[in-house]
Amino acid sequence: MDDKTRKIARRLANKIIRDVGPAVREYVGTELAGTEVKTGADGTPTSFIDQVAEEKIINILKNADVYSYLVSEEIGELKLGKGSKRSINLTQELRRTDLDEDETPKFIFLIDPVDGTNNAIKEIPAYAISIAIAEVNQGRVATINDVELGFLYNLANGNFFEAEKGKGCKLNNESVKPSNIINVNQMTLGGFTKTGTSEASKLVDSARRMRVLGSVVLELSYVASGKYDAFLDLRGSRIIDIAAGKLILEEAGGIITDKYGQKLNNVLSIYEKTIVVAANNEIMHKEIIDILNDNQADIIGKIGVISRIDQNSPIVFAAKIIDYLFTNGREVTVEKQLAHKLIELKENPNRDEIIEKTKRNYPDIAHTLDDINFNINYDIISENLFDFDCDMAIVLGGDGTLLRAHNKMQDEIPIFGINMGTVGFLTEIEVKHTFKALDDILRGDYYKEKRTRLVVSHENHNFKAMNEVVVMTEKPAKMLHFQILVDREIIEEVRADGLIISTPSGSTAYSMSAGGPIVDPKVGGFIINPICPYKLGARPFVVSDNSEITVKLLKKGKKAVFVMDGQINEEAKYEEEIKFKKSEKDALFIRTSTKYFYEKVKDKLNEGGINNKPRCNNE
């Protein structure tokens, strides 16, 4: 946004604030103020006082000499300017490339006319107007990170916050900054929790003070100016409520993310919402994120190392990691099969040539493979996977290697995956980031992510699966007849080549390839997905992970094989039942990255992930 454009945006924002203030104050505390006049575009009731404020805003932007898009909670999404007013879908409008320059709006205004409406109705002095402004980049969707100007005017006491991207934040023309409190036991916490969230209760109990004002925009500004130390909204805040507050807080020096510590990058839309966690500094923010996700980091003392062993490069890299861990004073245990391969490599007369080839395959880490210490007795530190007893298991390979390790190790051992496979969707990092990530982990800068698992019961035997269970015929090109029940209620009878019961983690694997939906791992559900069903109406189901799923074979004389995570095969016969339910114990992963799940979907599933990393050829 250049200086001229910024000046126009500021002028419009200031005029909106000047006109809305007196219009709202006239009705504060009156019976008329709270009269419900309609349902807003966001689905919530619109009070008379909201409508008064919004009409002022619309009138100003409509009569401006430039076009603008407006997103406001009562009216929805409009195109305004030069005397015109038209309802639009902002996402679709921004993607248009057919507008002439003089028809293209300059700005996107995200405005909450009165945040804290109930406070205004009852004359409680905590209600404000917030204005966020982004410049239009026609041809692409806008996100909250496109916001360049933020204004917040406290309609009750006249305090005025303003922020410009890269230029800092001011309160009544004076620069502000957050507090320097770093301990949750000393913090003043504001916001909204969610019923039944034990971690949120723990956070509230830890805080020195708790405030609930009923105005998201004001409370974010209080973190920016040091009146609060942290704020959260676990119900989910609308983007129009936080767009200005996010910029104000970040420009003051604070931090705002989602519940998992991931940066906000939501699309600008009337319908968009997000959970918000805001804090004064990185130390406080990490403490809050850890408590909310039950992710308190333990000291990592003993570490297991597992690797794919069908290629030389992972074995070479495993040797380097073991050397690194010993150098950093950690106790190490190595999977027996890997230990045997390391001994072979150690004694191989062509070892230097193998290492040089690994460097060529992985040029980003070539310098780390100089001077690997092979003076280690790998046999003494080796153990079977079943006997692993460690604080963390490092897995070198793709998803297959990781699932094999998970199925054989004790449930409580968290896994840290380094991608040396084809896709590596479940792995945490690519090879080039290994030692930076391990440095972070060893000093306690990590968190544990929980993933739902399945328990599979058949004929008094129990099995576990993290991705999926596939039920299929034991003979190729033959169909099975399934009866599928959820909590003992029949939901489908279908003939098909097979059936996939998938966790959200497995939704990006075989289930996706068979036409199933991609499901965020945070969703509490299972996917039931027939493979090539001979029935037009047969479609995937997503059911609660609190349900029990039962699959029964209906065709006499037919046998089926059910496979857990591609690792364990079992057989089921006519009228035998296979039951699926949520495991009491989750799978645990060590995470250092806040890369959002959907970004990973785009990165990893582009052409199956095969073009996103170096290939290991002719090993």
Image: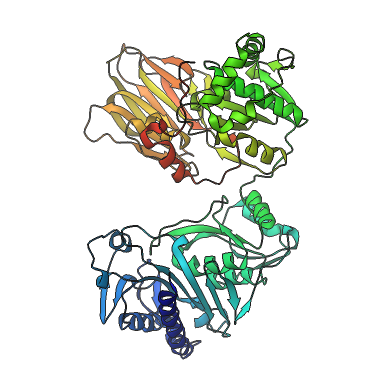
Image quarter in which the N terminus is found = bottom left
Q: Residue 127 vs residue 135: left or right?
A: right
Q: How many marks?
A: 0
Inspect this view and state whether residue 489 appears. Answer: no
Q: Residue 233 vs residue 526: left or right?
A: right
Which residue is located at x 40 percent, y 62 percent? Answer: 268
Viewer-nearest residue: 301 or 103: 103
**Residue 119 drawn at (x, y percent):** 53, 79
**Residue 482 drawn at (x, y percent):** 32, 24
When the figure is inspected, residue 441 is found, relative to residue 250, above or below; the finding is above
**Residue 509 drawn at (x, y percent):** 41, 31
Inspect this view and state whether residue 556 appears. Answer: yes
Which residue is located at x 36 percent, y 39 percent? Answer: 517
Which residue is outermost to the right? Answer: 329
Q: In which image quadrant can residue 353 be found?
A: top right
Which residue is located at x 54 percent, y 59 percent? Answer: 276
User: Which color scheme does this rendered protein use?
Assistant: rainbow
Q: Residue 361 vs residue 188: left or right?
A: left
**Residue 216 drawn at (x, y percent):** 54, 69
When the figure is inspected, residue 564 is found, relative to residue 15, above or below; the finding is above
Which residue is located at x 41 percent, y 33 percent? Answer: 609
